[in-house]
Amino acid sequence: MWSGIRTKVLNSEVVYGMMVRQGRDPGATTLVGQVGFDFVFIDMEHGAYSLETVADLIRGAKSVGCAPIIRVPAAERYFISRVLDAGAEGIMVPMTSTREQAERVVVYAKFPPMGRRGVGLGNAQVDFAAVKASDFTAEANDRTLVIAQIENEEGIRNIDEILSVDGIDLAVMGPNDLSFDLGYQGQTDHPKVVEEIQKVVDAARRCGKHSGTHMGSLEQLLYWKAQGMTFIAYNTDSGLLYKAASEGLQSLKEGA
């Protein structure tokens, strides 16, 4: 039922993943797990996914022990609770900018007494098994990873308050949106952008929490790993396909 991704994160293990936002068949997320990634982001913010498709992608990831983590479009109960009911092992909420937003996310993601998530069993979150509600809800609270995605200057200004919320496990950077918010559009390696991201790494360490990022640049990911980030997400399905296909085509055209 669980891959143990939250336990790994809380134990400060370095975990690796990638994002799926185009593939719709369960094989897309199964493949991510077969490669050896610890987790897969399923992108409901920028991917044109219905809940039914997300449920299929979740099952594909779980079939090979890869943790499915959903980037929901917003901090709303009807997104968060439904993807968790479908079997997701975690959620990431974009544009988390205040303590109040972070608290609301935990309320929707966690069962009582931590939150107010509604209890509906007999579905994919329990692998359709008969379970005791009190046992499962306690286990789910312990195993469900909750990520605040930090993507603007306001979120960085409030990062200590966001990470102080009980139930928020991790701050994951959104470097592209942050670069636009700071006025350096797309320059995720600009010194000012790097300086602001470092503030989140430092805050996570100070608060006893963890940090990570999602990027297409291996060089930048290795840099942030060296700075202490432990949650490393590389590229997207479409980005990797484009990169491999374009490089292959260029090699074929240049070959004898």
Image (tube, grey):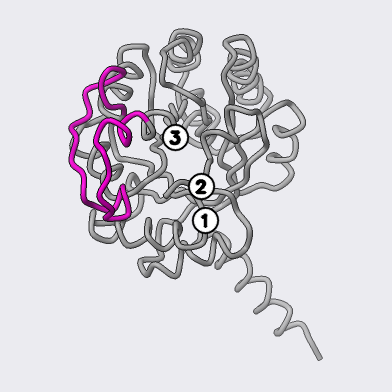
Q: Residues within 10 Å of mark 2 (few under 14, many from 20)?
A: some
The reply to whether dot 2 and dot 1 touch (C-beta < 8 Å) is yes
Out of 134 and 159, give the one closest to the viewer.
Answer: 134
Badge number at residue 143:
3
Q: Is residue 137 magenta?
A: yes
What range of the chain is rendered magenta? 110-138
Out of 124 and 40, give the one closest to the viewer.
Answer: 124
Q: What secondary structure predominates along the stretch shown in magenta?
A: loop
Give the quadrant of the C terminus.
bottom right
* Residue position marked by numbered label 2 in the rendering: 3
Instruction: Give amino acid for label 3.
Output: Arg
Q: CA distance from mark 3 to mark 1?
A: 14 Å
Residue 231's place in the image compared with 237, above or below, is: above
* Residue position marked by numbered label 1 in the rendering: 65
Instruction: Give amino acid for label 2.
Output: Ser
Q: Classify mark 2: helix, strand or loop.
A: loop
